[in-house]
Amino acid sequence: MSETPRIPVTMDEWFDEIARAYRDAREAIPFARVLGHPIREVQLWLAAPDVALKFRGLAPTETLRAKAANAAAASFTANASTQPSALDDRYVAFAFGYIASHFGLELLSAHEADAVMEHIELNRGRLVADIEGQHGA
């Protein structure tokens, strides 16, 4: 039986993993279109729960998918009302959905998830550079 991949501990590790997760989700866009489920890059936050399950090595059961997706949707809704400009950014929206999914899966505490999300928002430029391969990705 394989071991569940370790949860990032440092902010550097989170940035690296979120960049890899975003690129993984982006690579699936053409396949989604072929399967009749077109998605645009600005909507990748919707894929964040499934990518979180994949990166944690968890089976995408209905229960786990619902936990992750509900947490991501709740985070998106809450942030949309308090800081809508943050979620207008496709990179930040995906990162928030990815982190919220980990919270929904009970892999991060609310405090841990908030700390990572705050760091992401304050360092958006680094997130974009990591995702686009311009900063050691």
Image (cartoon, rainbow, N blue to C red):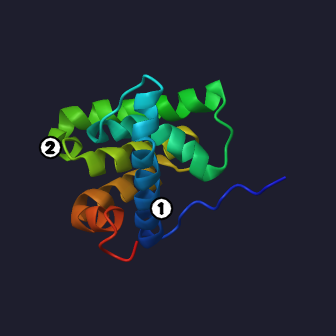
Look at mark 1 in the image and give the residue it sits on.
17
Label count reads 2
Q: Position of residue 104 (x, y in %)?
A: 52, 38
Kindly indicate the quadrant of the structure image that contains residue 29: top left
Left or right, residue 134 beside residue 60 = left
Rendered view: 98 above or below 43 = below
The dot on residue 85 is 2
Other residues around mark 1 within 10 Å, as few (<14) / some (14–19) / many (≥20): many
Q: Position of residue 30 (x, y in %)?
A: 41, 39
The dot on residue 4 is none
- Nearer the camera: disc 1 or disc 2: 1
User: What type is the residue that disc 2 sits on?
Assistant: Ser
The residue under the point 47% across, 51% down is: 24
Q: Position of residue 89 (x, y in %)?
A: 21, 47
Q: Residue furthest top?
A: 36
Other residues around mark 2 within 10 Å, as few (<14) / some (14–19) / many (≥20): few
Mark 1: secondary structure:
helix
